[in-house]
Amino acid sequence: MIGKRVQFDDETWHAIDLLARDSMKDFQEIADEAFRDLLIKHGRPTDLKTALRKSSELSDATGSQRPTGPPSQNRERPKARRR
């Protein structure tokens, strides 16, 4: 897990600490919930499964398919008939 250092002003820290104590959660649980809510607010996926589902829905909505182009030049040519 990646760790980052975050700074809060004293009033904010005391409010977060009080919330953590009242809800019997540690700071990590409070931070996880806050960042998960922030991602949801901005329409960002919070886990891999959701990200894949959203990506699939977007590709279905745009009708994207495999690109179609000229046949590959590496394909085997039909053999000539012998007379």
Image (cartoon, grey):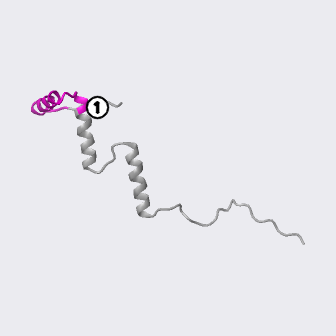
Residue 32 position, x and y percent, is: 27, 35
Given residues 73 and 49, the one toward you in this image is: 49
**Left or right: residue 7 compared with residue 60:** left
**Left or right: residue 36 compared with residue 51:** left
Residue 13 position, x and y percent, is: 14, 30
The secondary structure making up most of the magenta span is helix
Q: Which residue is mark 1?
A: 4
Vertically, is 24 above or below 75? above
| Secondary structure of the residue carrying numbered label 1 | loop
The N terminus appears in which quarter of the rendering?
A: top left
Q: On the image, which quarter does residue 56 sit in?
A: bottom left
Vertically, is 4 above or below 52? above
**Left or right: residue 43 compared with residue 80:** left
Q: Which residue lies at the image location 42% right of the left edge and 49% below the top edge? A: 52
Instruction: Check residue 8 for magenta coloring.
Output: yes
Q: Which residue lies at the image location 85% right of the left edge and 69% below the top edge? A: 81
Q: Which residue lies at the image location 43% right of the left edge and 60% below the top edge? A: 60
Q: Residue furthest bottom?
A: 83
Q: Which residue lies at the image location 69% right of the left edge and 59% below the top edge? A: 74
Residue 41 position, x and y percent, is: 24, 49
Q: Count the marks: how many? A: 1
**Left or right: residue 14 compared with residue 78:** left
Query: Which segment is the magenta one?
Result: 7-29
Given residues 12 and 4, the one toward you in this image is: 12
The C terminus appears in which quarter of the rendering?
A: bottom right
Vertically, is 44 above or below 63? above
Q: Label 1 sits on what residue type?
A: Lys
Given residues 3 and 65, the one toward you in this image is: 65
Instruction: Check residue 20 for magenta coloring.
Output: yes
Residue 38 position, x and y percent, is: 24, 44
Q: On the image, which quarter does residue 76 sit in?
A: bottom right
